[in-house]
Image (spheres, rainbow, N blue to C red):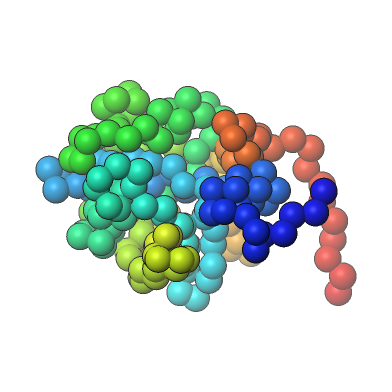
Amino acid sequence: MNLDFSRLKGNDSYHAMIQTIIPRPIAWVLSENDSGNYNIAPFSFFNAVCANPPLIMFSVAPATDNRGEKDTLYNIRQRRQFVVHIADASLAEQVTQTAASLPRNHSEAGASSLTMSKMTKFALPRISQAKVALGCQLHQLQTIGHEGTQTLIFGQIMQAYIDDDIGYINEQGRIIINPQKLMPLARLGGDIYQLPGDILTIERPK
């Protein structure tokens, strides 16, 4: 099979990409809306992009209804803070539920039985059930694609919560996280998720 992407429509390109660029990490993003409620939504066009300053990036498509832009983008544009969670296998159902489109200013937290915990040095709370949470300050918004079809949200990590059961700091001061204990969800095509399986360790050349 050879695909000529210059001949594919946007939706066809999307489906080809999400089934070949796999697995993809999931940014499970909490933001605050105009009513003071917490919007929660998953995004799988997501990764780390810089260490100094510590930046993450995720890509947001337009809303499919008449709102124009998704609640997550609107909230971050207004308040400039958000929390990115790394969800594990036990949260797969809740992650999927928070992908539903709710009216603006409604909260996905209540609809998915999620609870909040305070972060020590960050204004927004984190999802209590998630083992990793990254409190982020908006660094930059960038619109890309034909007719502005995607918005890249760059966030600078200001504080990280890591569950003590999955990680520690070694004698050299390096943070070590056990991926088998974290069991992070990864996104495949369609409605399919992936969990960590066998882990391969290969030493890099000197």
Camera-side residue: 22 or 157? 22
Count of marks, rendered view: 0
Residue that extends furthest to the front in the rendered view of this protein: 7
Q: Quadrant of residue 110?
A: top left
Q: Is residue 99 above or below residue 1?
A: above
Camera-side residue: 32 or 17? 17
Residue at 54%, 67% in the rendered image: 49
Where residue 180 appears, as percent x and y from the top left, is: 66, 37
Where residue 126 appears, as percent x and y from the top left, is: 33, 43
In the picture, the quarter occupied by the C terminus is bottom right
Residue at 80%, 54% in the rendered image: 2
Residue 61 seen in this snapshot: yes
Where residue 81 appears, as percent x and y from the top left, is: 28, 58
198 lies left or right of 16:
right
Residue at 53%, 71% in the rendered image: 50
Q: Is residue 176 above or below residue 147?
A: above
148 lies left or right of 47:
left
Q: Is residue 179 above or below residue 60?
A: above
Residue at 46%, 47% in the rendered image: 43
Where residue 73 appears, as percent x and y from the top left, is: 31, 55
Residue 181 seen in this snapshot: no
Residue that extends furthest to the left in the rendered view of this protein: 35
